[in-house]
Image: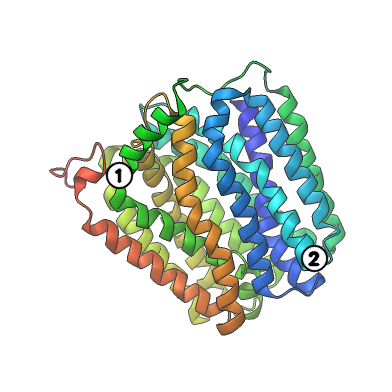
């Protein structure tokens, strides 16, 4: 698991650097691309990632884990390398899409290692590794971009190469801990589970849609509307990401003990309020305080949400189960960047933030209306 955690960290470090900082800033400032083109490029990344998630569980039943992870990371390395030469929009979009091939294999394999007992705490640990990488990437990238795009580009290439080389250390005989059963039977079981959790599906899509809308516009929003320098923007990301990482494991344990429903209701509502607060032109100190609130509310949501999803993954079919559920979640992330880029081009970045904040508030209200029976293991008699 130490090796897997290190590979996951490197993969998410580069992804955070690329999607949150490099693509928006380099695409707009260096290549002169519009925000809608940048949004489509990020959407292309998630399109490939989501499509692969749909089949990765099935592939894990048939091939060695190292083969899948190694092949995906090699494709990602090629995609990152091509970004440095993407001087036309179609190549920029294609390179971003190719980069999406390497994310799912390592991520889904890690999810198959989560045990039934203490799912929230385990999800908290896994998401800590994920968020440390995802959060450190844009912080480092913003600082490097002040020194030049070339340096930041080669850091991403070297990070991708390191993850690919580390994947050779995975034992050749490693396979996902899943039961080999006929594919049609697996789909039938998963179909019944998806039908059972049907009321949860809108929230699955809406939350990734809102988050995806923010990706193409965050750097320009921080610069043009919050008046932040790249260093100050890095500090804001560091505070938000740091609070999320620090809160994940304790929040995961609390959600195991006190119930997932109220963590989702409160977490999404506070996240929406804090996001809206950033549109009111706050001074630097208040903007950093809102970032702290965003981080803590996100820490409350993540373990509870993924622990809830884990309850709907059929035992012995974790690879396929997480692949299908992650695909459903990925629909929002797939559409979000393109929609966010289009809205920003037409109405400006603050309007995108307001729309995203409203979506998060609506999600909170939706979960407030859900009966406890949808949250497996919840006891409605508990004060939580």
Q: From this view, report whether residue 127 is shown above or below residue 90.
A: above
| Mark 2 or mark 1, earlier in chain | 2
- Measured in 3D between alpha carbons, the distance from the residue under mark 2 to the one under mark 1, in whole angstroms, is 49 Å
CB within 8 Å, label 2 to label 1: no
List the residue tagged with mark 1.
Answer: 195
Q: From this view, report whether residue 145 is shown above or below residue 130.
A: below
- Name the image quarter holding residue 101: top right
Under tag 1, what secondary structure?
A: helix
Q: In the displayed image of the protein, which residue is found farthest to the front?
A: 184
Under tag 2, what secondary structure?
A: helix
Left or right side of 267 for 290: right
x 33%, y 66%: residue? 362
State whether residue 31 appears in this view: yes
Q: How is the image coloured?
A: rainbow
List the residue tagged with mark 2.
Answer: 146
Q: Looking at the picture, how far across and down is residue 82, in whole percent?
A: 82, 53
Mark number for residue 96? none
Q: In the displayed image of the protein, which residue is found farthest to the top?
A: 173
Quadrant (top left/top right/bottom left/bottom right) for the N terminus: top right
x 68%, y 70%: residue? 37
Disc 1: CA contacts within 10 A as few (<14), some (14-19) or many (>=20):
few
Q: From this view, report whether residue 192 is shown above or below residue 351.
A: above
Q: From this view, report whether residue 143 is shown above or below residue 70.
A: below
Disc 2: CA contacts within 10 A as few (<14), some (14-19) or many (>=20):
few
x 49%, y 27%: residue? 113
- Name the image quarter holding residue 212: bottom right
State whether residue 152 appears in this view: no
């Amino acid at each position: 698991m130490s090796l897997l955690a290190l590979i996951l960290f490197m993969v998410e470090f580069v992804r955070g650097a690329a999607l949150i900082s490099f693509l928006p800033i380099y695409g707009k400032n260096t290549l002169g691309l519009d925000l809608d083109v940048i949004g489509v490029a990020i959407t292309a990344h998630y399109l490939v990632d989501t499509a692969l998630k749909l089949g990765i569980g099935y592939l894990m039943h048939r091939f060695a884990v190292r083969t899948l992870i190694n092949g995906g990371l090699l494709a990602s390395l090629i995609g990152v390398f091509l970004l440095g030469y993407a001087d036309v929009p179609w190549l920029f979009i294609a390179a971003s899409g190719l980069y999406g091939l390497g994310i799912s294999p390592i991520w889904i394999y890690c999810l198959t290692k989560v045990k039934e007992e203490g799912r929230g705490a385990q999800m908290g640990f896994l998401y800590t590794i994920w968020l440390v990488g995802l959060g450190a990437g844009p912080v480092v990238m913003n600082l490097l971009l002040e020194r030049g795009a070339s340096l930041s580009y080669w850091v991403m290439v070297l990070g991708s190469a390191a993850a690919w080389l580390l994947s050779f250390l995975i034992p050749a005989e490693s396979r996902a801990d899943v039961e080999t059963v006929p594919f049609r039977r697996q789909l039938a079981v998963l179909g019944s589970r998806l039908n059972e959790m049907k009321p949860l599906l809108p929230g699955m899509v809406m939350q990734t849609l809102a988050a995806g809308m923010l990706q193409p516009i965050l750097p320009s929003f921080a610069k043009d509307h919050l008046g932040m320098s790249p260093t100050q923007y890095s500090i804001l990301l560091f505070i938000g990401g740091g609070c999320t990482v620090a809160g994940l494991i304790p929040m995961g344990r609390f959600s195991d003990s006190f119930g997932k429903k109220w963590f989702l209701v409160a977490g999404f509502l506070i996240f929406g309020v804090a996001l809206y607060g950033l549109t009111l032109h706050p001074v630097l100190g208040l903007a950093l305080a809102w970032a702290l609130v965003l981080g803590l509310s996100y820490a409350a949501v993540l373990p509870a949400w993924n622990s809830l999803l884990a309850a709907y993954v059929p035992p012995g079919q974790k690879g396929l189960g997480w692949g299908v559920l992650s695909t459903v979640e990925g629909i929002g992330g797939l559409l979000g960047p393109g929609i966010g880029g289009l809205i920003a081009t037409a109405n400006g970045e603050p309007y995108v933030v307001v729309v995203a904040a409203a979506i998060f508030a609506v999600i909170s209200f939706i979960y407030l209306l859900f009966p406890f029976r949808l949250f497996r293991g919840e006891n409605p008699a508990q004060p939580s």
